[in-house]
Amino acid sequence: MLLELMRLINIVGHSNSGKTTLIVRLIPMLREFGRVASLKQLGCHSFNLPQGKDTTRHFEAGAECAAGIDSEKCVVSLQGSNLFSILDYYHWLGIDYVVIEGFKEYHFPCAVIGDFKTQYEVLNNPSAKDICYNLDRFAEYEPHHK
């Protein structure tokens, strides 16, 4: 059983404010401290599975989880997933840092990019290095399902 808590680094801001650019710079820096995962809220942009592929057909047939593995990566689709089920899964995998893009409604301490306003702001328009120097300002996550 894992006892370590994951650190949640939430990056929020309006569309096209530079969130993804910051995250792409941040992830390699965080990897110096531990294992890193990312999580993006897709919002109104639905992610479509490739039509006719075997894993898509498995998923559409009702598999709770369908995965495809190649020589470099694994792609997993989960039925009815929510933020906390994914965070629990990341914790189970031994992830140390989760970089989250979006999910403003969950009120995690966040780094704000651009002129977005929230009472949960802990850093305003930070660089990736600023975030690394202030990791203790971000939430630690305790799994909901142990």
Image (cartoon, rainbow, N blue to C red):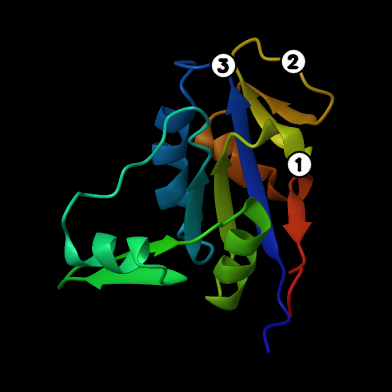
> 2 left or right of 109?
left
Tags 1 and 3 touching, CB below 8 Å: no
Nearer-the-camera pick, 107 or 8: 107
The answer to whether residue 22 is above or below residue 54 is above
Residue assigned mark 2:
117
Residue at the top extreme? 115
Sequence-wise, the earlier of marks 1 and 3 is: 3
In the displayed orientation, state which residue is furthest to the bottom: 1
Tag 2: residue type?
A: Lys
The mark found on residue 14 in the picture is 3
* Residue occupying the far right of the picture: 119
- The location of residue 71, given as percent across then percent down, is 15, 73
Q: Which residue is mark 1?
A: 108
Q: CA distance from mark 3 to mark 2?
A: 10 Å
Residue 73 seen in this snapshot: no
Question: Residue 14 or 76: which is nearer the viewer?
Answer: 76
Sequence-first disc among 3 and 2: 3
Q: Position of residue 98 (x, y in %)?
A: 57, 54
Q: Amino acid at mark 1?
A: Phe
Residue under the point 79% across and 37% down: 107
Left or right of 6 on screen, residue 94: left
Point 66% across, 31% down: residue: 111
78 w.r.t. 114: above or below = below
Give the residue displayed 19% in from the left and 49% down from the top: 51
Task: Determine whether the residue tagged by mark 2 lies in a helix, strand or loop.
Answer: loop
Q: Who comes first in sequence, dot 1 or dot 2?
A: 1
Q: Position of residue 118 (x, y in %)?
A: 78, 21
